[in-house]
Image (tube, grey):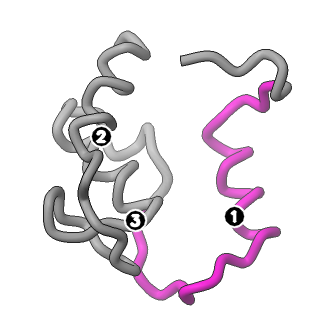
Amino acid sequence: MESSSIIAEARNWIGTPFQHQGRSKGKGVDCIGLVYGVAEVLGIAPDQIPEDYHGYGRFPDSGKLRRGLDQYMDRVRISQVQP
């Protein structure tokens, strides 16, 4: 899958209001809900993204969040970030 496809679909969600634990494009979504929504639209297999869960608080546990991101993503220096 091309990163441009992921970016294009994520941009389709612009304007969706923030809603804690939201999963609905146009109605309400949070950060992990956006990941799941984009993955679903693009047909990305569930084993290629973090397990979905809803029992998290409104404010992230930065250690848990970082461990989850490290499991599925490669770190990139801020100077190397590009679309």
Give the Cα separation between the discs numbered 3 and 1. 13 Å
Q: Secondary structure at mark 3?
A: loop
- The residue to which callout 1 is attached is 65
Q: Nearer the viewer, residue 7 or 41?
A: 7
- Most distant residue in the front direction: 15
**Does the magenta-highlighted stretch encompass residue 42?**
no
Could you tell me which quadrant the N terminus lies in? top left
Going by the numbered disc 3, the residue's amino acid type is: Asp
Q: Secondary structure at mark 2?
A: helix
- The residue to which callout 2 is attached is 39
**Number of the front mark, 3 or 1:** 1
Give the Cα separation between the discs numbered 2 and 1. 19 Å
**Does the magenta-highlighted stretch encompass residue 59?**
yes
Q: Nearer the viewer, residue 64 or 25?
A: 25
First reached walking from the N terminus: tag 2 or tag 1: 2
In this rendering, is residue 78 above or below 65? above
Q: Which mark is residue 40?
A: none
Q: Are marks 3 and 1 in contact (CB under 8 Å)?
A: no
- The residue to which callout 3 is attached is 52
Residue at (53% x, 84% y) in the render: 56
Check disc 2: other Cα within 10 Å, few if <14, some if 14-19, many if 20+.
some
First reached walking from the N terminus: tag 3 or tag 2: 2
Q: Which residues are magenta?
A: 52-76
Residue 12 percent coordinates (x, y): 22, 37
Going by the numbered disc 2, the residue's amino acid type is: Ala
Going by the numbered disc 1, the residue's amino acid type is: Leu
Residue at (63% x, 16% y) in the render: 82
Residue 65 percent coordinates (x, y): 69, 64
